């Protein structure tokens, strides 16, 4: 594919090509300083006078081999001191500035790229580059300057582009193969079921028109293949850059994998990957990304690019097992490895969280809003409740006390921060009086400074101490998530306190996630919501961020209604208070029912306890009947 435009941010280019070393949870400063970092940048920028221009957008386009490379980034500042021009990059830290050597190759990599582009745009022969390290605790800064010619900076940038180009070439060749196979692809079944073609056409039109579609299609139509196939066809026409098949449960992700497998057996070439939650794919007993604990974290970044390259060259349908196989082979973290592989995949099968949850969504994909991504949202009726939780957060008083007990008395900074938060909880508890709960529309702004203070001192502790405190680390992330959700607090939230014996909970609860969900949905150029129970469809359209001109479709069941029979036994009550008296009756009815006609039968129950009681009675009374019982709950993430 010639003259194909490749867009990538300068930061992503530098980090992808130049990354090395360990994967380390202690290197959490970047995520936490996303909360503090903006203010740190502003303080440094405001310390200069009118000779300092902050937040300078830099763009650079160049032809490289058969590609058109488009780079974009934003320098933190350009400083003019007489004839001297300095390109400034600001990094916030909690480390003692005496320990900051300014030898981080990724930090210099970014500012070198900015430096070359600024030289190119302004016609300069060279420029000074400055790394400004700002200590969040003390407000002190340390500045380290290098001087480079335009030619030196150009060589550095083009070396990065050259190393990145092998990936671009690999995927460009793949896309030619993929699109050729898509053009020849036929629907993987001989005939369409009733309603199936209608659904497929509606999905294709939704994507082509850049709309949102809300489709109710009963069980049996074949919704997964009817949504995936037309979306893949649109990808072959360059209408779609990447497909996200979003689900609430593991079992539905497996159905999507099976659909891709069916299409591949008919000649389709598509790279798909299924993402798995960290705690489910991790090889270790505890999910601690600490190089001293996990051998897959130690040196992860030294090996991960080779691991990505090999899996892309050898595999197409990349499941959890495939990810783990290559992660073991290359000794890399399977979770982070999977996220990196997803960058190069055509289809990403994953949980709702990866697209919508503000705390964990895949920012690497959605930083730019000009991508032609499509969301296929399976079992979309589940998304409303899930979204409420995504935009809610809670904290428990007991967690702060447990962490305090785990600390040494010399950790005075953290203990002081914990005491302030604990006192806040005690005051709330006293204000509740005899009431067990309390609700208000206003957000708990008075709590935020205390939580920020806890984050700051805890980050410094975690960075400086080799021995990991798992309770402290867990609370750190809970507080960080609470602060993150506070950024989304709106008229659609309430603050809720609940007294739980000696404990107490505070929760920022999102009553209506529609507005926030709409912002997340708009990261895609087209979204298809589908479910067997998306009814009333107009109601779900409103809740799930729909516009007046978005599409709605309701399909009837493909099965003959004459084959359905509903039998109700009014002599049996399944109310909780009546269950004890009816377990035996239900067991006997099941036996009479299955004895009336030879076949296989499913019995569904509203709880595991209910099911197990009836099952025990049934196998005791009818040991000759072959039975099976669900042993574990379906995974929800």
Image (cartoon, grey):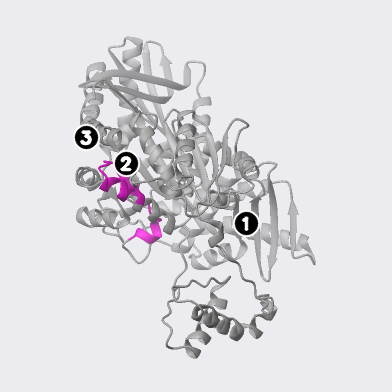
C-alpha distance separating marks 3 and 2: 12 Å
Q: In this figure, what is the number of numbered marks?
A: 3
Classify residue 514 as left or right of residue 220: right
Looking at the rendered image, the quarter that the N terminus falls into is top left
**Residue 170 numbered tag:** 3
Does the magenta segment cover residue 272? yes
Check residue 461 in the rendering and tell me which mark sits there, or answer none: none
Relative image position of residue 472 (x, y in whole percent): 48, 60
In the image, residue 271 lies at what x, y percent? 29, 43
Magenta residues, as a range?
259-282
- The residue wearing badge 1 is 421
Q: Of residues 485 and 626, which is closer to you in this image?
A: 626
For the question of whether residue 270 can be seen, the reply is yes
**Viewer-proximal residue among 138 and 332:** 332
Q: Marks 3 and 1, Cα distance to the nearest angstrom? A: 53 Å
- In the picture of the structure, the residue carrying the numbered disc 2 is 345
Residue at image coords 60%, 83%: 583
Q: Quadrant of residue 282?
A: bottom left
Q: Residue at x 65, y 61 (%)?
A: 505
Q: Nearer the viewer, residue 59 or 27?
A: 59
Q: Please, is residue 566 above or below residue 261 in the view?
A: below
Question: For residue 586: magenta?
Answer: no
Q: Which residue occupies the extreme right position in the image? A: 434
């Amino acid at each position: 594919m010639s003259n194909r435009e490749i867009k990538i941010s300068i930061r992503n280019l530098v980090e992808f090509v130049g990354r090395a070393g360990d994967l380390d949870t202690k290197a959490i400063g970047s995520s936490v300083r996303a909360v503090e970092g903006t203010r740190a940048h502003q303080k440094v920028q405001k310390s200069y006078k009118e000779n300092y221009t902050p937040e300078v957008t830099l763009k650079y386009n160049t032809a490289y081999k058969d590609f058109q490379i488009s780079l974009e980034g934003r320098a933190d500042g350009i400083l003019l001191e007489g004839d001297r021009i300095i390109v400034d990059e600001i990094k916030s830290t909690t480390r003692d500035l005496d320990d900051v050597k300014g030898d981080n190759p990724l930090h210099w990599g970014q500012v070198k790229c900015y430096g070359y582009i600024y030289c190119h745009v302004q016609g300069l022969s060279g420029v000074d580059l400055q790394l400004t390290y700002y200590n969040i605790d003390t407000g002190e800064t340390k500045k380290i300057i290098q001087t480079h010619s335009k030619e030196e900076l150009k060589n550095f940038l083009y070396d990065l582009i050259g190393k990145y180009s092998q990936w671009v070439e690999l995927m460009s060749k793949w896309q030619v193969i993929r699109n050729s196979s898509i053009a020849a692809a036929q629907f993987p079944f001989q005939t369409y079921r009733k309603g199936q073609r209608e659904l497929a056409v509606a999905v294709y039109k939704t994507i082509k028109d850049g709309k949102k579609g809300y489709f109710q299609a009963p069980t049996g139509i074949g919704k997964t293949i009817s949504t995936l196939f037309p979306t893949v066809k649109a990808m072959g026409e360059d209408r779609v850059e990447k497909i996200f098949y979003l689900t609430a449960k593991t079992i539905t992700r497996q159905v999507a994998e099976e659909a891709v497998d069916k299409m591949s057996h008919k000649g389709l070439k598509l790279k798909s990957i299924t993402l798995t939650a960290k705690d489910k794919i991790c090889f270790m007993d505890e999910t601690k990304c600490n190089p001293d604990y996990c051998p897959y974290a130690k040196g992860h970044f030294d090996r991960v690019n080779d691991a990505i390259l090999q899996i892309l060259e050898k595999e197409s349908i990349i499941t959890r097992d495939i990810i783990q196989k290559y992660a073991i082979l290359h000794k890399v973290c399977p979770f982070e490895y999977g996220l990196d592989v997803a960058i190069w995949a055509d289809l990403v099968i994953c949980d709702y969280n990866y697209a919508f949850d503000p705390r964990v969504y895949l920012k690497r994909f959605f930083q730019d809003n000009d991508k032609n991504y499509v969301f296929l949202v399976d079992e979309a009726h589940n998304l409303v409740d899930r979204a409420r939780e995504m935009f809610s957060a809670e904290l428990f008083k007991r967690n702060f006390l447990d962490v305090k007990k785990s600390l040494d008395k010399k950790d005075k900074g953290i203990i002081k921060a914990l005491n302030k938060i604990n006192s806040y909880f005690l005051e709330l508890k006293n204000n509740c009086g005899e009431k067990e709960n309390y609700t208000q529309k206003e957000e708990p702004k008075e709590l935020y400074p205390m939580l920020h203070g806890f984050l700051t001192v805890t980050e410094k502790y975690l960075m400086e101490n080799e021995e990991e405190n798992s309770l402290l680390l867990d609370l750190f992330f809970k507080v960080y998530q609470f602060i993150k959700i506070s950024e989304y607090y709106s008229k659609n939230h309430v603050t809720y306190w609940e007294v739980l014996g000696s404990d107490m909970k505070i929760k920022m609860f999102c009553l209506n996630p529609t507005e926030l969900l709409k912002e997340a949905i708009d990261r895609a150029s087209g979204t298809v919501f589908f479910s067997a129970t998306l009814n009333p469809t107009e109601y779900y359209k409103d809740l799930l961020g729909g516009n007046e001109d978005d599409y709605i479709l309701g399909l009837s069941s493909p099965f003959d209604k004459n084959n359905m029979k509903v039998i109700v036994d009014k002599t049996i009550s399944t109310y909780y208070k009546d269950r004890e008296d009816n377990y035996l009756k239900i067991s006997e009815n099941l036996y009479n029912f299955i004895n009336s006609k030879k076949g296989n039968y499913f019995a569904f129950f509203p709880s595991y306890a209910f099911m197990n009681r009836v099952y025990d009675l049934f196998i005791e009374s009818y040991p000759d009947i072959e039975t099976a019982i669900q042993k574990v709950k379906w995974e929800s993430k």
